[in-house]
Amino acid sequence: MNAEDVMHELEALGKERTKKIYLSNGAKEPVFGVATGAMKPIAKKIKRNQPLAEELYATGNYDAMYFAGIIADPTSMTEDDFERWMDGAYFYMLSDYVVAVTLAETGIAQQVADKWIRSGEELRMSAGWSCYCWLLGNRPDSEFSTTKLEKMLEVVKDTIHGSPARTKASMNNFVYTVGVSYIPLHEQAVETAKAIGPVEMNQDEKKTKYLLAAENIQKAVDRGQVGFKRKYVRC
């Protein structure tokens, strides 16, 4: 399949209701409104194809950009490639659920994520923290520096409430993920979550909501999920 074939198939799978949901979350036209699960049969036919992924990502069509992340070959991507993808990631569903996820399957994930966290740019920071969430939820605890993660928890505690909205959300998720998926710092994550308290999320015209990492970690504890690891980063 070439890029034109994929675009035709994606367009045929688009649903107006799904499109409205994507637009309400920050997507911009062009958007078809394809449910992610509906993309799987096409992905199975293509498998991994980086040149095709690059063509689709460059279209600016949200569904095509998301699909690009599904068929991308992360091991062939360089830091410059990820920077270019981040330049095109105009809202969090691309930065956190396409670029950060794809980065999490590489050997340069922490190096690039650390750089993005320090960038001062809302979506790059969000992607950096999100990448650590994907990493922690998939890789063995032994691949991480406990000291480094401790310092990151301190950074979250000291800066989360003054951070941009999407960065706040990803920082909050980082605390939750450490608490659930990184056993050596479970207790410290719990204490950090309690110290942070409710994290206010103002969503334009939507009702303000609050993120509660401590409460969500406790729910995971009650379900016996501490130590949880995904088998795969991408579905």
Image (cartoon, rainbow, N blue to C red):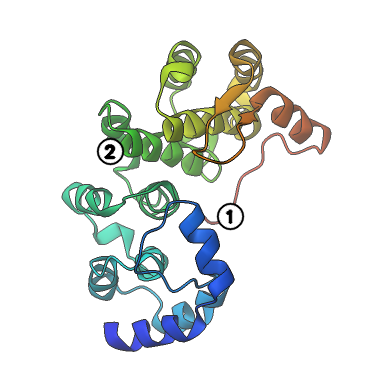
Within-10-Å neighbours for mark 1: few <14, some 14–19, many 20+? few
Q: Residue furthest right?
A: 222
User: Residue at image x 27%, y 70%?
Assistant: 50
Label whose residue precedes the other's in the sequence (1 or 2): 2
Where the N terminus falls, by quadrant?
bottom left
The residue carrying mark 2 is 112
Nearer the observer, 182 or 30: 30
Residue identifier under label 1: 231
Is 147 above or below relative to 174?
above
User: Which image quarter is the C terminus in?
Assistant: bottom right
User: Looking at the picture, how far across and down is residue 166, in whole percent?
Assistant: 44, 35
- Residue located at (42% from left, 31% from top): 167
Task: Please tell me in which quadrant of the rendered image residue 220 appears.
Answer: top right
| 210 and 99: which is toward the camera | 210
Percent x, y of residue 48: 36, 73
- Disc 1 to disc 2: CB gap under 8 Å: no
Circle 1: residue type: Lys
Q: Secondary structure at mark 2?
A: helix
